[in-house]
Image: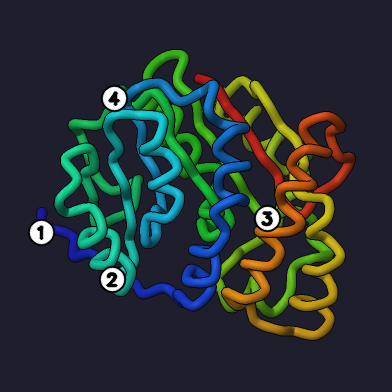
């Protein structure tokens, strides 16, 4: 059988640069996932590695997957001297026999919405995880917030809780945690990115990360919001 040639794929990256300024936001997400890490960890769609840095504060080894031809070289260069990190240019559903039943946890941070068949993706994750392992998922929420920026970023959808519950049920996962996240971000996102059709930039992201995120983190750690700009999901095999 002839070898399948990998399709070239590039990703719109300006918004990834803006997210590099969101250190507090990343740490907030990480705190929610920290109890479910284990030792063997994968990050799917690692981008330029900003969230990878958060993960590496809590584990010894990370396998970071990135399919984009223009982003992967940045990821590879960032970690080429870090023996704790293995970078792979490809998708998680490519053939990687050595990783079957290998991982304790697998991260999808703002990645699942880029995948057309998200159910098939999570079925593959289920088969790849060790028994008792966790899929750690963070996605954009609320369909009415889907706008020009989502299209530009290649998002197929924004999620509601019922969407994630349905996928989890069909893929045989057990839901350990599901919650809306960042209620304060709903109105700014609606105004700037849906109504006004603006682009994300580092200045806006840095201000929000510096002043709003620490406050909302304290509030949402005490009171679970009924709705939020994002959804956070922990699945267990």
Residue pictured at 21% horizontal, 62% vertical = 77
Circle 2 sits in a helix, a strand or a loop, which is it? loop
Q: Earlier in the sequence, mark 4 or mark 2?
A: 2
Rendered location of residue 164, percent (x, y): 68, 39
In this rendering, would 135 be left or right of 9?
A: right
Circle 1 sits in a helix, a strand or a loop, which is it? loop
In this rendering, would 34 be left or right of 163?
A: left
**How much space separates mark 1 and mark 3, taking CA atoms?**
39 Å
Q: Residues within 10 Å of mark 1 (few under 14, many from 20)?
A: few
In this rendering, would 55 be left or right of 207?
A: left
**How much space separates mark 3 and mark 4, taking CA atoms?**
28 Å
Residue corresponding to mark 1: 2
Residue corresponding to mark 4: 102
Residue corresponding to mark 2: 69
Q: Tell me the mark number nearer the camera, choosing from 1 and 4.
A: 4
Q: Earlier in the sequence, mark 3 or mark 4?
A: 4
Rendered location of residue 87, percent (x, y): 23, 50
Q: Which mark is residue 140?
A: 3
**How much space separates mark 1 and mark 4, taking CA atoms?**
28 Å
Q: Tell me the mark number nearer the camera, choosing from 1 and 3.
A: 3
Q: Is residue 172 above or below residue 217?
A: above
Q: Earlier in the sequence, mark 3 or mark 2?
A: 2
**How much space separates mark 1 and mark 2, taking CA atoms?**
23 Å
Between residue 113 and residue 19, name the one nearer to us.
19
Q: Is residue 55 above or below residue 182?
A: above
**How much space separates mark 4 and mark 2, taking CA atoms?**
26 Å
- Count of residue discs: 4
Q: Earlier in the sequence, mark 1 or mark 2?
A: 1
Between residue 2 and residue 108, name the one nearer to us.
108
């Amino acid at each position: 059988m002839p070898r399948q040639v990998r399709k070239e794929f590039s990703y719109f990256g300006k918004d990834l640069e803006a997210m590099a300024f969101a250190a507090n936001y990343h740490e907030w997400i990480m705190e929610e996932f920290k109890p479910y890490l284990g030792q063997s960890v994968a990050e799917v769609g690692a981008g330029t590695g900003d969230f990878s840095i958060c993960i590496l504060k809590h584990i010894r080894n990370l396998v970071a997957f990135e399919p984009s031809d223009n982003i992967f070289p940045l990821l590879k260069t960032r970690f080429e001297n870090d023996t704790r990190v293995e970078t792979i240019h490809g998708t998680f559903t490519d053939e990687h026999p050595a990783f079957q039943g290998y991982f304790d946890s697998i991260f999808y941070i703002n990645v699942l919405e880029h995948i057309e068949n998200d159910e098939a993706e999570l079925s593959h994750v289920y088969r790849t995880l060790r028994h008792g392992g966790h899929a750690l998922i963070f996605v954009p929420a609320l369909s009415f917030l889907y706008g020009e920026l989502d299209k530009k970023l290649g998002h197929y959808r924004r999620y509601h809780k019922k969407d994630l519950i349905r996928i989890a049920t069909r893929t045989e996962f057990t839901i350990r945690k599901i919650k809306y996240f960042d209620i304060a971000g709903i109105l700014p996102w609606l105004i700037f990115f849906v109504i006004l059709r603006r682009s994300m930039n580092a200045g806006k992201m840095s201000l929000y990360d510096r002043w709003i995120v620490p406050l909302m983190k304290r509030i949402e750690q005490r009171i679970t919001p009924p709705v939020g700009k994002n959804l956070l999901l922990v699945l267990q095999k």
